[in-house]
Image (tube, helix red, strand yellow):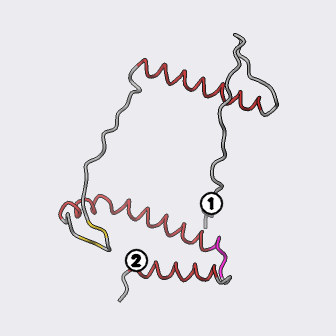
């Protein structure tokens, strides 16, 4: 008897073959997989607390090809309470803003010049990866 993971993987692989053979629309299978992934993500969040308890009891065990272990959370430092840090962040935001404006002006073959006569170096710009936008339709 196949386990759930094997069954899902087999069904998705079959659908992907259908795309390769021209029997299925890639976007339709993509949307289906996105829905499955969202459901799985929600299910994992719901199970996480209980799974952590089980993981503590089953360290070293293997489930579905994954060896179980746990680790403590990473240290996370915050500097927002340090006045000098806040001032520097504000200066950085101002510099980012003027550099972006300088880039926009450069596109119009002009320079961004401060009140002091300084030519602002424009920011470098590159486009991010194109993406597919799927919006869940309410039933």
Q: Quadrant of the C terminus?
A: bottom right
Which residue is denoted by mark 1 in the rendering? 135
Q: Nearer the viewer, mark 2 or mark 1?
A: 2
Where disc 1 sits, the SS reads loop
Instruction: Give the residue furthest to the bottom.
Output: 1
Q: Kindly identify the residue that appears in the image at 65 percent across and 32 percent down.
A: 123
Q: Kindly identify the residue that appears in the image at 64 percent across and 73 percent down.
A: 26
Give how far across and how far down residue 2 sits, in percent: 37, 86
Q: Kindly identify the residue that appears in the image at 55 percent across and 25 percent down.
A: 92
Q: Main secondary structure of the magenta part?
A: helix
Give how far across and how far down residue 98 sits, in percent: 66, 24
Q: Which residues are magenta?
A: 24-28
Which residue is denoted by mark 2 in the rendering? 5
Q: Which mark is residue 64?
A: none
* The one of 113 and 69 positioned closer to us in this rendering: 113
Residue 25 colored in magenta in the image: yes
Give how far across and how far down residue 29 sits, in percent: 60, 74
Residue 94 position by quadrant: top right
Label 1 environment density (alpha carbons within 10 Å; few <14, some 14–19, many ≥20):
few
Residue 99 position by quadrant: top right
């Amino acid at each position: 008897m196949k386990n759930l993971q094997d069954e899902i993987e087999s069904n998705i692989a079959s659908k992907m073959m259908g795309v390769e053979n021209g029997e299925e629309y890639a976007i339709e299978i993509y949307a289906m997989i996105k829905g499955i992934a969202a459901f799985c993500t929600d299910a994992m969040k719901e199970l996480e607390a209980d799974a952590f308890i089980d993981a503590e009891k089953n360290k070293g065990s293997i489930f579905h090809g994954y060896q179980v272990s746990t680790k403590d959370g990473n240290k996370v430092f915050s500097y927002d309470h340090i006045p000098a840090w806040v001032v520097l962040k504000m200066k950085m935001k101002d510099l980012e803003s003027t550099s972006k404006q300088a880039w926009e002006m450069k596109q119009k073959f002009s320079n961004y010049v401060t009140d002091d006569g300084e030519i602002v170096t424009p920011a470098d710009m590159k486009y991010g990866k194109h993406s597919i936008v799927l919006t869940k339709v309410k039933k």
